Image (spheres, rainbow, N blue to C red):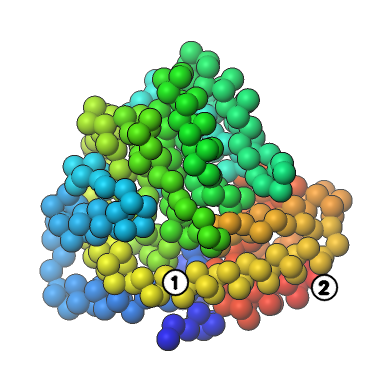
């Protein structure tokens, strides 16, 4: 019914992913958007809006279809009952965690961040004149885990005001358990630290695991900002629609104040696409996740057959974190690009001996990537 095998020509579209290696024979496997056409229902909704032909101002809080879609999605997917007033729309999760820092921290305050992590999260404290305090993600007992001893120490510092979490974790693909969320909540509560949780990949859990939204946890409801978006799940990142869910009215007021004059309203087309994605595309999402599971399993097996490379199967996302320390080369990124593959550089995530591969592509493209890396 849905053709994820289609290899779409993106020449001339000025795609950020493809522009990076334009004019070379390097396959772009870096930035986290997929190579899949969006669900037909999203295309139809956007086409109807274009045919209407008027594109005036739309205040996201007044766009009832998108707000109702978010409320219903949270109930259906996470058994989380949220109120319309809790939703604050932003044009992406990156503005979300930057605004959280701006709203809650003074220059010189500490912002706790797990590493390795999504590069814009790593950059956010410095952008806002704060100090990033890194907490490692460790491979133990067959899983990636937060270093909770280091988290406790970081949170206990008098200047620690905010923790920015990524769950599911990017780049390692780990989905945090209820016990781990409880531990984070206990530490944040004990030390008066607010949790800003980037959960943009939470609808792309590929294993049979539940997602536990930060704001749903009773002990975090008053000290959390949960960032979500349909962007990765439904491949509509270019339409610029995301939302923060903030149950605490005082916290939400501070967040909204920090937004004013700096962050524009969410794009109208983003609201239209979000409404369609969260209400009409369940079958498409099921099919996409099944395709991604196949790609993941194929790629993990192939990577582990290449001398010098090693990878653990991610529980979520369409991103594979590859350990290239066994190559014994000076520059891992240069090694991959010389093979004709352009991954996300590990050094951008704070771990230079790794790289990240995007497997949200057609199987034939993934097979080309594997052939190049094996050559």
Does 41 sit above or below residue 73? Answer: below
* Image point (54%, 34%), residue name: 113
Residue at numbered disc 2: 375
Q: Nearer the viewer, residue 114 or 138?
A: 138
Could you say whether the residue bearing mark 1 is in a helix, strand or loop?
A: helix
The answer to which quarter of the image holds residue 99 is top left
Crowdedness near tag 2: few (<14), some (14–19) or many (≥20) residues, C-alpha within 10 Å? few
Question: Is 206 situated left or right of 303 in this image?
Answer: left
Among the two numbered marks 1 and 2 on one chain, the one whose residue lies closer to the N terminus: 1
Quadrant of the rendered image containing residue 333: bottom right
Q: Nearer the viewer, residue 213 or 20?
A: 213
Q: Give the vertical position of 253 relative to 28 (above or below).
A: above
Q: Is residue 172 left or right of residue 208?
A: right
Query: Residue 138: horizontal and vertical position, in percent?
Result: 68, 39
Give the Cα distance between marks 1 and 2.
34 Å
Percent x, y of residue 45: 24, 74
- Residue placed under numbered mark 1 in the picture: 286
Identify which residue is drawn at 54% across, 57% down: 316
On the picture, is 231 further left or further right than 362? left
Q: Residue 275 in the image: x percent, y percent? A: 25, 64
């Amino acid at each position: 019914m849905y053709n994820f095998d289609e290899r779409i020509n993106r020449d001339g579209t000025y795609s950020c992913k493809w522009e990076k290696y334009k004019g070379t024979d390097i396959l772009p496997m870096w930035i986290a958007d997929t190579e899949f056409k969006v669900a037909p229902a999203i295309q139809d909704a956007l086409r109807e809006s274009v045919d209407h032909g008027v594109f005036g101002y739309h205040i996201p809080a007044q766009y009832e279809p998108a707000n109702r879609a978010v409320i219903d999605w949270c109930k259906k997917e996470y058994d989380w009952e949220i109120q319309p007033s809790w939703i604050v729309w932003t044009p992406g999760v990156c503005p979300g965690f930057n605004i959280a820092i701006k709203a809650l921290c003074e220059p010189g305050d500490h912002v706790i961040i797990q590493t390795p992590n999504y590069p814009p999260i790593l950059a956010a404290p410095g952008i806002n004149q704060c100090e990033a305090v890194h907490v490692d993600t460790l491979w133990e007992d067959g899983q990636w885990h937060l270093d909770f001893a280091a988290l406790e120490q970081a949170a206990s510092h008098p200047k620690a005001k905010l923790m920015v979490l990524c769950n599911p974790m990017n780049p390692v693909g780990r989905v945090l358990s209820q016990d781990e969320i409880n531990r984070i909540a206990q530490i944040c509560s004990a030390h008066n630290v607010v949790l800003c949780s980037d959960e943009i990949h939470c609808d792309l859990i590929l294993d049979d695991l539940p997602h536990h939204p930060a704001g749903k946890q009773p002990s975090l409801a008053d000290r959390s900002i949960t960032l979500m978006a349909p962007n990765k799940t439904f491949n509509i990142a270019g339409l610029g629609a995301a939302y923060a869910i903030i149950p605490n009215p005082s916290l939400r007021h501070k967040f909204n104040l920090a937004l004013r004059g700096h962050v524009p309203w969410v794009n109208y087309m983003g609201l239209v696409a979000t409404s369609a994605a969260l209400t009409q595309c369940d079958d498409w999402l099921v099919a996409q996740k099944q395709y991604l599971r196949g790609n993941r399993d194929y790629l993990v097996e192939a990577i582990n057959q290449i001398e010098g490379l090693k990878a653990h199967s991610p529980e979520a996302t369409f991103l594979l974190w590859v350990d290239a320390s066994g190559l014994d080369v000076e520059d891992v990124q240069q090694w991959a690009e010389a093979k004709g593959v352009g991954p996300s550089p590990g050094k951008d995530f704070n771990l230079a001996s790794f790289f990240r591969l995007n497997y949200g592509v057609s199987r034939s493209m993934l097979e080309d990537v594997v052939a190049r890396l094996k050559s």
